[in-house]
Image (cartoon, rainbow, N blue to C red):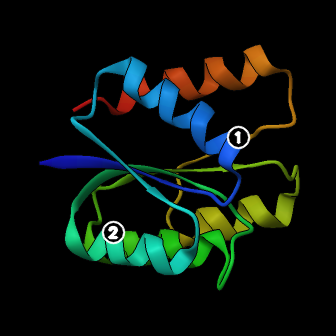
Amino acid sequence: MTAFLIADNSKAKVMMLELLVKKSKKFPAVLIAHSTDEAKKLIDGNDIAAAFIDYEMPTENGPAVIAYLKARNPAARIALVTSFDNGSYEEAARAAGAEACVCTTNEEKEVKDKLEALLMEWGL
């Protein structure tokens, strides 16, 4: 079964992202990781087709998780979803394999619209 991974240590953001993914009905399972170690374990044990990954998490940063997922599933669709509007974060995430970056400090409607568009594009 293909799954969607949300890797973020912010419980509020995880709840918002999980709601959007489930609402899209594009992915049969949504897996949650609150640290890079948890994310890697979920990647090892599941077929992750797509992911929203935060930049700053316990243990390592988001690009480490992005690179780890891409090494195991080169076709995985990945977006960096972070509260930091930082060009170097986006650059590192894209270098690791992310195809999109969404800053969650932008206007709520804009953030949700971008994330929903990605989910529609990525639907399997």
| Front in this rendered view, residue 40 or 49 | 40
Most distant residue in the front direction: 11
Q: What type is the residue that disc 1 sits on? A: Ala
Q: Name the residue under label 2.
A: 42
Indicate which disc residue 74 carries: none
Instruction: From the top left corner, tell me how far across and down residue 3 is, in percent.
Output: 26, 48
Q: Which residue is drawn at 32% across and 70% down?
A: 43
Up-down relation of residue 13 to residue 117 (above or below): below
Badge 2 amino acid: Leu
Q: Residues within 10 Å of mark 2 (few under 14, many from 20)?
A: some
Q: Residues within 10 Å of mark 1 (few under 14, many from 20)?
A: few
Q: Which of 7 and 73 is in front in this view?
A: 7
N-term-proximal mark, 1 vs 2: 1
Q: Looking at the picture, does residue 23 appear above or below residue 33?
A: above
Q: Distance between the residues labelled 1 and 2?
A: 20 Å
Question: Pointers 1 and 2 in contact (CB under 8 A)?
Answer: no
On the image, the x and y values in percent for residue 38 come to 46, 74
Q: Is residue 87 above or below residue 123?
A: below
Where's residue 57, x and y in %? 69, 70
Q: Position of residue 107 (x, y in %)?
A: 85, 21
> Residue at (71%, 53%) from the top-left corner?
10
What is the number of the mark on residue 12?
1
Residue 41 is at least partly visible in this image: yes
Q: Pick whichever, 78 or 35, lies toward us.
A: 35
How many marks are shown on the rendered structure?
2
Quadrant holding the C terminus: top left
Q: In this view, does 48 lie above or below 95?
A: above
- Give residue 45's quadrant in the image: bottom left
When asked about the image quadrant of residue 35, the answer is bottom right
